[in-house]
Image (cartoon, rainbow, N blue to C red):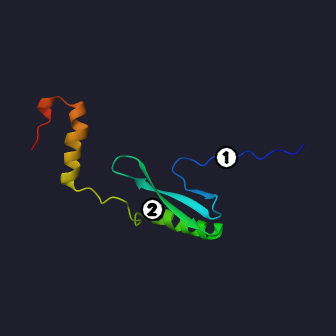
Amino acid sequence: MAEEKKRTRRANGESAIYLGQDGRWHGRVPMGYKDDGTPYRRHLTRPTCKELVEEVRRLEKQCDEGSACQLDKPWTVEKWLLHWVENIAKHGRQREHVRRV
């Protein structure tokens, strides 16, 4: 009796490549996280698997180097501090420790 090959899943944060119902190859590449904490994935389509794999690898390399375009602009110090005071600090601190500047 031949052994059946067990299907394995990819780990969280890895790229996904699959053949869509439209006959084209689709890829989803994780590029980081949005400001609200949800993952940001870039979606690609190519007619052949080989073309898609090349493009996915190129995007993964850019992401690892930090040169890939992100969805949101980087936060300024002012924007981050306002976010921290309004969303993070007020939940864990007493009112007298957090005051609006």
Of 71 and 47, the residue lying toward us: 47
Q: Position of residue 1 (x, y in %)?
A: 90, 43
What SS does tag 2 mark?
Answer: helix
The amino acid at mark 1 is: Thr
Of 40 and 68, the residue lying toward us: 40
As measured in the structure, the alpha-carbon distance from the residue carrying label 2 to the one carrying label 1 is: 25 Å
> Outermost residue toward the right?
1
The answer to whether residue 96 is above or below residue 66 is: above
Q: Position of residue 16 (x, y in %)?
A: 58, 55
The amino acid at mark 2 is: Cys
Choose top left, top right, bottom left or bottom right for residue 3: top right
Indicate left or right for 41 with 50 as reference. left
Query: Residue 8, labelled with which disc?
Result: 1
Indicate left or right for 67 with 90 as reference. right
Residue shown at 23%/43% (left/top)?
84
Choose top left, top right, bottom left or bottom right for residue 51: bottom right
The answer to whether residue 6 is above or below residue 64 is: above
Q: Position of residue 29 (x, y in %)?
A: 51, 58
Of 41 and 1, the residue lying toward us: 41
Numbered marks: total: 2
Residue shown at 11%/30% (left/top)?
96
Residue shown at 52%/68% (left/top)?
58
Query: Residue 63, labelled with which disc?
Result: 2
The answer to whether residue 98 is above or below residue 74 is: above
Q: Position of residue 75 (x, y in %)?
A: 26, 56
Indicate left or right for 34 with 11 as reference. left
